[in-house]
Amino acid sequence: MDDWSTAMKKIDAHAHVFDHIASMGKAGELRPLGNGNCRWATGEEFRIIPEGCGDKEYLVESFLKVMDEHDIEKAILLQGVLYGLQNEYAMECAEKYPDRFKAAVMLDPFCRCAQQILDRFINELGAHIFKFEVSVGGGLSGYHQDFILDGPVMTPLLDRIAEVDDATLVLDIGSPSMSSCQPEAVYRIAEKYPNLNIVVCHLLAPSLSDGHALACALPYLAHDNVWVDLSALPWNVAPEAYPYPTALEYIRMAKDVLGEKKIIWGTDSPCVLTKFDYKSLYSFIEESDVFDSEELEDVFYNNAVDAYHLA
């Protein structure tokens, strides 16, 4: 298995890099303390960067080292409110290493200049991937009033994004227990913009007790232009131990409802690497019986190529 899996091409379709920490969330601002540790305004402290991989930053070169150690061919650099928006840095990384990365941008739709910001991202930065992290836990809904994903705040931005050739919309809508988790809205967006690729992060971030809620939500994501990524599943089913049988059960559920060509592998590095070895984030899938060898090639590579227009 090890020789075969090493030879299989992989794209990490959910990763983050940042040259500084500038976070804002439900716990207020996040202050970097050094050596990868941070403190929320509430006083909670935690590690955000794996030890030895950065002080107050996780640079693209640090992630490239991890990718090379694990034979990861490419990665999608997404935006995360946990780290603070890194739009220009991420786009610079993709420009510097065009064969290894494609980068997303994100903006806060509540900004008065939101349309102007989006136009600049499209016209000046050449953005084609647009991430909105709206979850209560780590996104916009943590420090804004609840809003409808396809309501009046978002619709003008979605309309503009849908005009971009080969665009991908990435949505982190949080866990089933959160008000931000609106799979019905994802379905409506997919219906309204049939030429817009949509990726839903973390397979809806289900915890150990969210199996029924996930089963109810998945049919809304069964759409021609919708994919789900598997990033951070081991994190979300903690404290379950390797090989994370509940996570594998959830992946099997997604395969049954969506089909294996709508499932994309990713890790959510770097924060997950403070608790998990990078290899374990792919080996638990490879070593399972959820996918055959041909399906694994789709999950680890081909589906990301389709969803993110990498060909």
Image (tube, grey):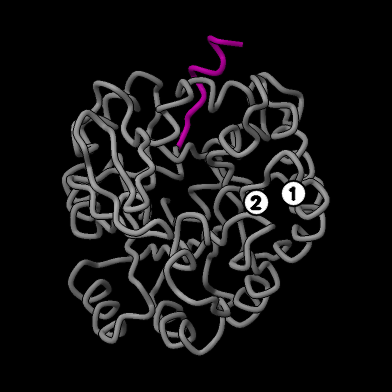
Please say whether residue 10 is one of the residues in the magenta stretch: yes
- Determine which residue is flagged by label 2: 262
Q: Position of residue 246 (x, y in %)?
A: 74, 33
Identify which residue is drawn at 47% across, 82% down.
154
Q: Position of residue 128 (x, y in %)?
A: 35, 65
Q: Position of residue 223 (x, y in %)?
A: 70, 65
Residue 259: mark: 1
- Classify residue 139 as left or right of residue 53: right
Q: Residues within 10 Å of mark 2 (few under 14, many from 20)?
A: many
Please say whether residue 235 is one of the residues in the magenta stretch: no
Chain part drawn in magenta: 1-11
Q: Which quarter of the picture shows residue 173? A: bottom right
Q: Is residue 257 above or below residue 195?
A: above
**Secondary element at image label 2:** helix
- Classify residue 20 as left or right of residue 256: left
- Circle 2/circle 1 CB separation < 8 Å: yes
Give amino acid for label 2: Lys
Q: Is residue 28 above or below residue 75?
A: below
Q: Which quarter of the picture shows residue 195? A: bottom right
Q: CA distance from mark 2 to mark 1?
A: 6 Å
**Secondary element at image label 1:** loop
Give amino acid for label 1: Gly
Near-viewer residue (148 or 281): 148
Q: Which quarter of the picture shows residue 282? A: top right
Q: Residues within 10 Å of mark 1 (few under 14, many from 20)?
A: some
